[in-house]
Image: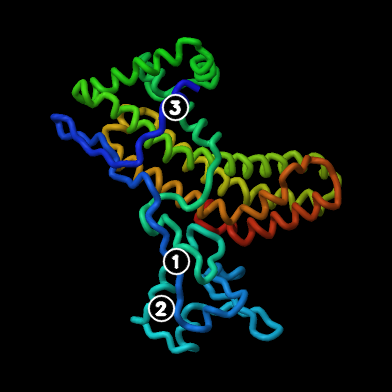
Amino acid sequence: MPVAELRSADLTETEGHNADGRELMANAPRKAAPARRFDFAHKVFQVEGGLFQPDPQTEEPVFSVDMGELRANLTFTSVRTAFGIAPDDPDSKLLDEVGRALAYVRRIRPGDAIPSELLDGTASWRIDEHHRAAARGRISIGLVAWMSGRGSVQNMSTLELAKIADDPETKARVQQAFGKLADDLGLPADKRGDVVKQIDKLVDELAYIEALRENVARARRVLETLKRLRAVYKRERGVHDEIERTVALSEPPVHKLEMQLTEVDAQSGETANALRTLPRQIAFIREVRDRLHSQMMKWDDILEAWQGVTAEPSARIQKLVRDTYRFVARHFPAESEWVR
């Protein structure tokens, strides 16, 4: 991909404005902040096996701990009351922070690092290099489209995008785009290299969107497999009806996930416009990233269970359908906001 040859931006911050005062440089940190930890003082948090997680039934943050032969899920209010943790106690404030952190991770153990989303806005979860490559490719195609005066990538067909990506002149045209971008942004000659740094920053942020796009696509594949199973089980009324209910409840949330990706693509698809307000663009990308990541964590177990499954009748398929129905009925009931 053409932009793949660009070097990664330095880890130092650069700031600047053109004569019109338009924003050019992102103020978002390039490195995650030094890790802080959930270091509780009270002995209850030192019990072996204790962890924080959303309650399986209510999704309220709880402290899950073994009490004899039972596993108890204690609400934070119960923990404060039972163990005399006052509202102004540092442990109480850490509990509040745990509640916020569970939007970004599924489980937290005392002593774990506080997610970087709460510290500096960077993502605390890992992505692969191919996600960055995908983000670079998307930006590259967008730059070529902009240079050609053809507008946003969103307005181009898949065939047009593929043709541009395979064009042997693409690399040279992307390099030309850097100069045009610098002129368009009003950068002086000695600052034109900053365009590359700003594109790298945008790529770094959009790489997380590409990783989420993969997971959303997995959810769509599960839904499409369920749709094909309707024909497979058309003569088994009970199974067929359960598949129908599962499809009906699954379609709205999957569509909503896809629409959030479309929104990010529309906002960042025109690179020149994105660079003019890069700090705001990064803030927007991170807000959608965190929202999507939080929503997709609910799907993790279901997506893993369906991995590699084909639309063929089997006892395993019927169990997966039942499990998926219970999942969507619990998280996305028909009366919820998903289908209003």
Going from the N terminus, do you reach mark 3 or mark 2 first? 2
Mark 2 crowdedness (10 Å alpha carbons): few <14, some 14-19, many ≥20: some
Q: Nearer the viewer, mark 1 or mark 3?
A: 1
Spatial CA distance of label 3 from label 2 is 47 Å
43 with respect to 24 (left or right): right
Residue denoted by label 2: 92
Image coordinates of residue 57 in percent, x first then y, are: 60, 70
Residue denoted by label 3: 154
Q: Which amino acid is tagged 1?
A: Arg
Image coordinates of residue 298 in percent, x first then y, are: 58, 56
Mark 3 crowdedness (10 Å alpha carbons): few <14, some 14-19, many ≥20: some
Helix, strand or loop for disc 2? helix
Helix, strand or loop for disc 3? helix
36 with respect to 183 (left or right): right
Q: Is residue 269 visible?
A: yes
Spatial CA distance of label 2 from label 1 is 14 Å
Looking at the image, is 52 positioned above or below residue 148? Answer: below
Image coordinates of residue 101 in percent, x first then y, are: 46, 63
Q: Which amino acid is tagged 3?
A: Gln
Going from the N terminus, do you reach mark 1 or mark 3 first? 1
Q: Are marks 2 and 1 in contact (CB under 8 Å)?
A: no
Residue denoted by label 1: 37
